[in-house]
Image: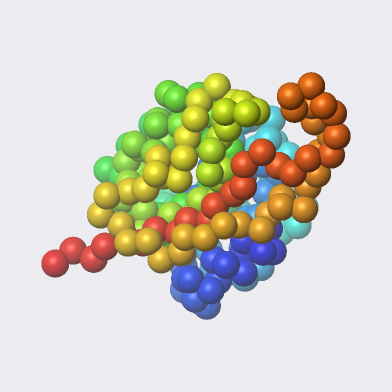
Amino acid sequence: YIYFATIIRKYIGNIKDEICFLDIGSYYGGLQYVLKKVYPNSSQILVDFPHQLSRAAYFLESSFPDSQIYAIYDNFSLENFFRSYTLKKFDFILVTTDLYNQFSDFYTERKYSIDLLTNFYSLGEMPNDAFYGYLKSKIMKNSKMIYFCNRYDSSPFYEPTYEERYSLLDYLFFGYDIVLNRSSGIHNYMMPIRTLFGETRPRPISSGYFELIQQKKKST
C-alpha cells in the first residue's frame, strides 16, 4: 500500500485541497489508510463485498476516530446518501459490490467525478460480466485518472488460474492518455510450489503484473 501510494503521489502530486479516490476491491482499507495520511482532506470510496467492508469500517474507524463514515448497503442507504448528503461530508464511503452500478449512475448524474480510480489484482480474477460491468460503468469512464495493477495474462495457457483470459489491452480506455505503463515488481519474488507437466517444484509466478495509469484527455 505504501508503494502504490508513493506512485499515486508521484503522478497526482501533493494536493492539499479536497480530492476523491475510488478503489474497487479495497479489502480491509489498507490503501485508504495510507492515502488518508497523505491526503487528509480526501474522500475515499471503497467498493467490496459486505464482509470486507465490515473489516474496513472497523479498521478505519479505529485508525481515524474523528472521521465520518457512511455505508451504502441497500436501496434506502443509497438513496438517502444522494438525497441528504454531499460527498465532501464523509471521509470514507463504503459501497457494496451489488450496489456499485446504481451508485455509479447516481454519482454521474450529479456531475461528480472521481479524481483517481484504482484496482489492484482483483479485476483479473472476475468473470466476464463482472469485469466488463466495472470497466463500462459510468463512474469509471468519467474518472480523471485510472490506475490498474493486474496480470498480463489472467489465465496463462500452461497454468490457467481463472475462467477468463484478460490482457493489458482489455484495460485500455478510449479518450485517455497513458502516463505509466510498465511491469510491476510486485510478487516477482514469489516461488510457489506447483506441479507443471507432472513435476512439482518451486516455480516463478505464471504471469507477471503490469502497472497502468491512464489520464482523461482534456476537452478541446
* Image quarter in which the C terminus is found: bottom left
Q: In the rendered view, tell whether residue 64 sits above or below residue 76.
A: below
* Image quarter in which the N terminus is found: bottom right
Residue 74 seen in the figure: no
Depth check, front residue: 218 or 20: 218
Q: In the rendered view, tell whether residue 112 sits above or below residue 164.
A: below
Q: Which residue is drawn at the image coordinates 40% and 32% (left, top)? A: 132
Q: In the rendered view, tell whether residue 206 sits above or below residue 39.
A: above
Applied colour scheme: rainbow
Q: Which residue is drawn at the image coordinates 27% and 43% (left, top)? A: 109
Residue 136 seen in the figure: yes
Depth check, front residue: 87 or 134: 134
Depth check, front residue: 17 or 27: 27
x, y percentage for residue 39? 57, 69
x, y percentage for residue 198? 79, 21
x, y percentage for residue 162? 59, 26
Q: Which residue is drawn at the image coordinates 37% and 61% (left, top)? A: 178
Q: Which residue is drawn at the image coordinates 62% and 69% (left, top)? A: 6
Q: Quadrant of residue 157?
A: top right
Number of numbered tags placed on the structure image: 0
x, y percentage for residue 8? 54, 66
Q: Quadrant of residue 193?
A: top right
Depth check, front residue: 181 or 94: 181
Q: Is residue 55 left or right of residue 149?
A: right
Q: Is residue 81 left or right of residue 218?
A: right
